[in-house]
């Protein structure tokens, strides 16, 4: 490991359960890999997590990074802020970075002002779409964006949006979403055998959340059309789909699976569906599930939002019109026989961490 004078002390603020995953018990994604890869480059890194699930405070050291967690419902607002402020002051960071939602941006901005240190803010989604009615929070988020010395985002569409809150758009930089290293190509037959899936029929997969902002029900509409031509086809779901999905003919629900099994689910299906709607969330979403399917070389059909079109390098084979079930079904029927697709891949997390390190050293 190489240390030099350009290395910094970096404090990340992040909610403990982004994308419904506990970063203490189930570390993954942007929120885990960027801090640990930054630490591997020689930076001194600490991550302060916050939650609202009546959890006890704790501290662990993992992969050269200290992770501390405090809970709003356990401590209350004042004690929580005192704990966060005290830990931040003791650490003495060169940079404070808000890292997972609008609250993280606000916390980072507040602590950076108190400690008179440099402020960075990261956005992987349009956070203002999470709680659309909370206008005071939106205002605080935009203030954090305006004050930040550095802003990083998951893609160019989001960069354009957050730049509206800033006087210097050149200080907004792209650190794309990508898959964790566990997502690699695995033999399809062995994956189906392990998961108890039918060995020799067409399987279509969907693992996203079922929300209006995603337009998730379009998956069911498209699958009905597919079944008219492929009666033996099945739609493989995970998690807790709504009753309407579970009652759909041809649906197989695997339920909640261990994280280690998710690469097998992607590799077991013939095609992965990625659906987004034309909403404040969908227009600026860079789905992790799409990155994971791409890393496994599994063919996809994805709603052609501007952000998803960018992720897929405008490869029209994998894109379907937003909100159009027939067009999604058309592409599903065309693509499910593809094998070992070679996508134009985003940079892996170590490369993005090197880019972040460069940006921090210039700040």
Image: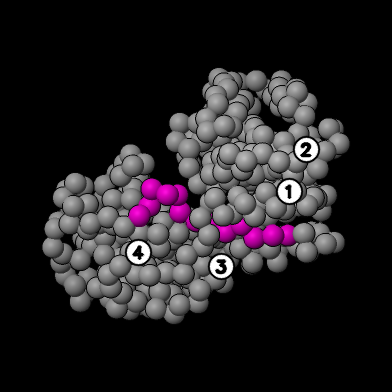
The image quarter in which residue 317 lies: bottom left
Mark nearest the camera among 1 and 4 is: 1
Q: Secondary structure at mark 4?
A: loop
Question: Does residue 256 show up?
Answer: no
Counting from the top left corner in percent of width and height, residue 325 is at 38, 73
Label 2 Cα neighbours within 10 Å, binned few <14 / some 14-19 / many ≥20: some
Q: Residue at x 56, y 54 (%)?
A: 351
Cα separation between marks 1 and 4: 33 Å
Q: Residue at x 51, y 55 (%)?
A: 348
Q: Residue at x 85, y 33 (%)?
A: 114
Instruction: Find disc 2 in the rendering and name its residue.
Output: 94
Instruction: Find disc 1 in the rendering and name its residue.
Output: 360
Instruction: Find disc 4 in the rendering and name its residue.
Output: 297
Which numbered disc, 1 or 2, marks the residue that appears first in the sequence?
2
- In the drawing, what numbered circle is on residue 307? 3
| Horizontal side of residue 222 vs 316, given as left or right | left
Mark nearest the camera among 2 and 3 is: 2
Counting from the top left corner in percent of width and height, residue 110 is at 80, 37
Cα separation between marks 1 and 2: 9 Å
Cα separation between marks 2 and 3: 32 Å
Which numbered disc, 4 or 3, marks the residue that appears first in the sequence?
4
């Amino acid at each position: 490991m190489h240390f030099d004078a350009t290395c910094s002390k970096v404090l990340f603020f992040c909610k403990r359960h982004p994308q419904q995953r506990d970063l203490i018990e189930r570390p993954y994604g942007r929120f885990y890999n960027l801090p640990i890869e930054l630490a591997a480059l020689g930076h001194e890194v600490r991550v302060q997590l916050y939650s609202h699930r009546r959890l006890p405070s704790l501290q662990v050291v993992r992969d050269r990074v200290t992770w501390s967690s405090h809970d709003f419902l356990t401590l209350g607002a004042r004690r929580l802020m005192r704990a966060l402020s005290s830990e931040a002051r003791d650490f003495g960071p060169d940079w404070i970075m808000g890292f997972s939602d609008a609250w993280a941006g606000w916390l980072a901005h507040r602590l950076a002002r108190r400690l008179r240190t440099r402020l960075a803010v990261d956005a992987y989604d349009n956070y203002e779409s999470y709680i659309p009615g909370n206008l005071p929070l939106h205002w605080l988020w935009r203030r954090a964006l305006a004050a930040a010395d550095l802003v990083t985002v998951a893609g160019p569409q989001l960069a354009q949006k957050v730049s509206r809150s800033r006087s210097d758009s050149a200080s907004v930089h792209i650190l794309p979403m990508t898959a964790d290293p566990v997502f690699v190509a695995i033999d399809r037959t062995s994956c189906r055998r392990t998961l108890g899936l039918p060995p020799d029929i067409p399987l279509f997969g969907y693992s996203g959340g079922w929300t209006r902002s995603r337009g998730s029900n379009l998956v069911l509409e498209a699958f009905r059309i597919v079944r008219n031509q492929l009666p033996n086809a099945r739609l493989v779901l995970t998690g807790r789909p709504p009753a309407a999905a579970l009652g759909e003919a041809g649906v197989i629900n695997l339920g909640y699976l261990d994280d280690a099994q998710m690469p097998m689910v992607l590799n077991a299906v013939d095609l992965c569906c990625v659906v987004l709607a034309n909403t404040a969330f969908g227009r600026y979403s860079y789905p992790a599930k799409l990155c994971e399917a791409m890393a496994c070389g599994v063919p996809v059909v994805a709603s052609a939002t501007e952000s998803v079109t960018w992720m897929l390098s405008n490869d029209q084979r994998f894109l379907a019109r937003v909100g159009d079930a027939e067009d999604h079904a058309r592409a599903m029927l065309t693509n499910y026989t593809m094998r070992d697709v070679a996508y134009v891949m985003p940079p892996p997390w170590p490369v993005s961490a090197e880019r972040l390190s460069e940006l921090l050293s210039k700040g």
